[in-house]
Image (cartoon, rainbow, N blue to C red):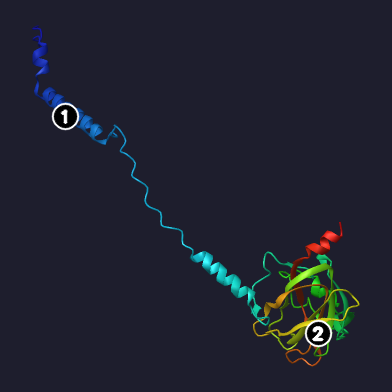
Amino acid sequence: MSLPKRQTITKVLFRPYYVIVLVVSTALFCGVSWLAEKTAPQTGPLPPPSPPAAQPPISTELVLVGDVLREQLRRRPRHEVSRKGPEPFFTDFAADYLGGIITNASPTYQDKTIVSFAGIPIFYETPNSPSIMLHRSVHKLNETDHWKMDGRGGNFSIALHEPTIIHSFGYRHVNVTDVHPAPAHFTFAVRSNRHESPHRVGRWVYNATVGGLQRFYLEKPITAQFVDVRVLSNHGDPDYTSMFRFFVFGERDSRSFMELY
């Protein structure tokens, strides 16, 4: 039996397929090294920062616009109406949670609303009192939160908790589906004390077609503690006038506040 021929290392290494594998491996290694070198982040000193861009001068247009608006506010006519809500720096001093109360009012319309069940009357619903005009939150009013003033007009008086510098007042009507009971023409008067004669400030008109909260501005602020409102007419209802929410906007009189201490 003959033994296999011995193969030297040189013959094994230089076989064709070994040469091909070696060449391909070398090419792959060189390609990966070149790609890693190209994608590596460049190191070196950072470039100098660019000079800041020139800022444009501050325009005085806003200041001028503000002055114009303040001048227009000062010269605002007393009959001007704003549908915006209460201004942040003015408080509703007529609200009952701040001490506002109704001291005098016209008779209430007695409509004898019947509450029934299955056609059987159970009881007569008591009408709301005038104090509801100062009680309800402006965001929670519904069509039943109103005082029915007897007739096409009447009056009511509000006592504020303390002397107040009054800048404006307002009224909000809710039931816009039937505008006839809404107040139309009315006057606004003030008093310093309970026994003083009312000082009439002016006459205004509530626009029931627009509805919502409407604000009425005085020609100049006036200090008072009692407010008298007289409704001269409504928008056509012959039986009663609906009064929802009444506001007196102003600020505390610092002189009367200091007298307490």
Quarter of the figure with the N terminus = top left
The image shows residue 29, relative to residue 52, as above or below, that is above
Give, as a three-letter code, the residue at label 1: Ala
Q: Which x, y percent locates residue 97?
A: 81, 65
Asked if the residue at tag 2 contacts the one at tag 1, i.e. Cβ–Cβ closer than 8 Å, the answer is: no
Residue at 76 percent across and 75 percent down: it is 245
What number of labels is visible? Answer: 2
In this view of the protein, which residue sits in the foreground, 234 or 124? 234
Could you say which is closer to the camera, residue 254 or residue 86?
254
Q: Compute the Cα span from label 1 to label 2.
A: 103 Å
Asked which quadrant contains residue 229, the reply is bottom right
Q: Which mark is residue 19?
A: none
* Front residue of 114 and 95: 95
Q: Position of residue 81 (x, y in %)?
A: 66, 79
Q: Is residue 35 left or right of residue 114?
A: left
Kind of element beneath mark 2: strand
Q: Is residue 95 visible?
A: no
* Amino acid type of the residue that numbered disc 2 sits on in the rendered structure: Arg
User: Closer to the observer: label 1 or label 2?
Assistant: 2
Q: Position of residue 123 (x, y in %)?
A: 90, 79
Indicate left or right for 1 with 78 as reference.
Answer: left
Image quarter of the C terminus: bottom right
Q: Earlier in the sequence, mark 1 or mark 2?
A: 1
Q: Within 10 Å of the Cα at label 1, are there few (<14), some (14-19), or many (20+) other Cα atoms?
A: few
Q: Is residue 48 visible?
A: yes
Q: Quadrant of residue 31?
A: top left
Q: Which residue is mark 2?
A: 230
Kindly state the secondary structure of the residue where label 1 is placed.
helix
Residue to which mark 1 is pinned = 27
Q: Quadrant of residue 87?
A: bottom right
Q: Is residue 112 above or below residue 70?
A: below
Query: For mark 2, does the 10 Å Cα neighbourhood hold few (<14), some (14 to 19), or many (20 or more) residues?
Result: some
